[in-house]
Image (cartoon, helix red, strand yellow):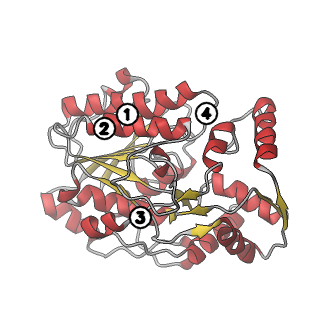
Amino acid sequence: MFYKKKMRHKYVLPLDSYWRNCSKYGRPMKALVTGATGFIGSHLADELVKRGYRVTCLVRKTSDLRWMEGLDVNRICGDCQDEGSLKQLDPDFDYVFHLAGLTKAKKEEDFFCANAKGTENLLRVVSANASSLRRFIYLSSLAAVGPSRNGSALDETREPSPVSSYGRSKWEGERITLQYKDILPVTIIRPPAVYGPRDRDFHLFFKMLKRGFYPNWGKCYYSLLYVDDLVRGMIMAAETSGAAGGTYFLSDGMVYSNEDIVNEIVQVLNAKVLRLRIPKAALNLLVEVGELFGKKTSIINRDKFRELSHSHWVCDPKKAERELGFKPKVTIKEGIKWTADWYRIHQWL
């Protein structure tokens, strides 16, 4: 389905997209997506279908399938942490987009089971069967490298030094992926904070600001990326032959202070907020109490606090621009507005 309605917030695809995808290799490209029921994965699956790919989504028995309703994809029940369940996968995939993993967990071992061991299981199965594979994309994170210590934007030459369990597990996933680079054409993508429709982490921040509350623990700086741009970048990395074996940071190319981000959201929500300065020691105590008594794992947890204790989470996307031709299309002003509109329409705000 091709459309150009503003509220959909999608760029119009060329009308010959499907036919180009078919005629290039004589048939539609076949893609496997793990993590397709999540925030980023669901947008990726949407886009691949629109581009004419035949998409298979690996889903767990407990997965929430709401974003797949009406989407023309093949579903296979399986779990990357269970290698046996992966044996049923069709070996004839052209592309594998591995997005499945944990971003929140109470135990470090849970991060490693999902983000490292799960990646290893999938790579082992894919490498044994997928002789026609054109690219294996591993979605990592800026957290795998860690924060900038001197304030300058990190590039791909920076030696990883993650500060959180999540970051260490994603770095381990990267390390395992690169062990297969002589067997499979692998590419690693490292986005910073990603936002957009369906995202629950930024949604928490939107809700706090709408209610007039802004906890401020000091000046911080971030790179950001709107979800549509991330999806485009991943597909570009998959389809660019020279990207095999490479690692790429993706961002919108700007650096934002926490005040910049807050001001954009406040303006869109037309909200008045009380800015409360919270010492980091007090914030740490609140996080530990909330984690102790909370029934669910929230984005506000001790592991995330280890990341929030650092002030510069910034990366440089120039390598992706140079080698992939990646250029972000969505500004923060557009992205925040579109995200807020989606939250309102779906009664999340």
* Residue count near mark 4 (Cα–Cα under 10 Å), binned few <14, some 14–19, many ≥20: some
Q: CA distance from mark 1 to mark 3?
A: 26 Å
- For the residue pair 98 and 248, the one nearer the viewer reads as 248
- For the residue pair 178 and 90, the one nearer the viewer reads as 178
Q: CA distance from mark 3 to mark 2?
A: 22 Å
If you read the primary sequence from the N terminus, does the residue marked by circle 1 or circle 2 appear first? 1
The amino acid at mark 3 is: Asp
Residue 316, numbered label: 3
If you read the primary sequence from the N terminus, does the residue marked by circle 2 or circle 4 appear first? 4
> Mark 1 against mark 3, which lies toward the viewer?
3
What kind of element bears circle 3? loop
* Residue count near mark 1 (Cα–Cα under 10 Å), binned few <14, some 14–19, many ≥20: many
The residue tagged 4 is 105
331 relative to 299 in the view: left or right: left
The amino acid at mark 4 is: Ala
The amino acid at mark 1 is: Thr
What kind of element bears circle 4? loop
The amino acid at mark 2 is: Thr
Which quadrant of the view contains residue 298? top right
Q: CA distance from mark 1 to mark 2?
A: 7 Å
If you read the primary sequence from the N terminus, does the residue marked by circle 1 or circle 3 appear first? 1
- The residue that appears at 84% across and 68% down in the rendered structure is 273
- For the residue pair 182 and 278, the one nearer the viewer reads as 278
Task: Locate the C terminus and report the quarter of the image it occupies.
Answer: bottom right
Which quadrant of the view contains residue 195? bottom right
> Mark 1 against mark 2, which lies toward the viewer?
2
274 relative to 236 in the view: left or right: right
The residue tagged 1 is 119
Q: CA distance from mark 4 to mark 3?
A: 28 Å
The residue tagged 2 is 177
- The residue that appears at 70% across and 44% down in the rendered structure is 300
